[in-house]
Image (cartoon, rainbow, N blue to C red):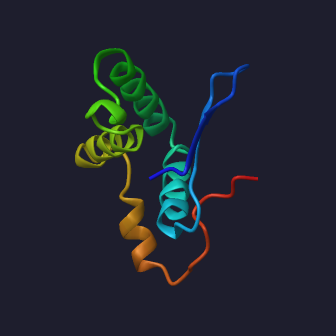
Amino acid sequence: MPVVKARDPKTGLGVDLVVNNDIAVQNSDLLCKYASYPRAKELILLVKLWAKRHLKDSTSGGLSRYAHSLLAISTLQQARVEPNLQAAEASSSSSEALCDAS
């Protein structure tokens, strides 16, 4: 759960601030890595845009933006369009972050 939710008034970009949650950092790294695949990035953005216009958000009992992202990624994995990066990371001995946000 986010501790603080904020939105940049200029760009409209939303930010969720989470403290002491290593899983959230790993999840963000994973989504960042998937976003490096053009088809995944496009489908994730399309699904999130569609959901924002047509479905309830998580505060109203709907799915979160994160869940919509996972559904888009899962669809691409099932169609064998994009790889399963979680499986690749699990078989790797590296514990580095998946994506460099800098």
For the point 50% across and 50% down, the residue is 2
Residue 40 percent across, percent down from the top left: 44, 39
Spot the residue most to the right: 102
Residue 21 percent across, percent down from the top left: 52, 66
Q: Quadrant of residue 66?
A: top left
Q: Quadrant of residue 65?
A: top left
Q: Is residue 41 above or below residue 9?
A: below
Spot the residue most to the left: 78
Q: Is residue 3 above or below residue 98?
A: above
Spot the residue most to the front: 3
Residue 92 percent across, percent down from the top left: 48, 79
Comparing 26 with 89, the one in front is 26
Comparing 46 with 91, the one in front is 46
Q: Is residue 42 above or below residue 26?
A: above
For the point 62% across and 35% down, the residue is 6
For the point 29% across and 42% down, the residue is 71
Residue 41 percent across, percent down from the top left: 49, 36
Q: In this rendering, would 55 be left or right of 82?
A: left
For the point 36% across and 68% down, the residue is 87
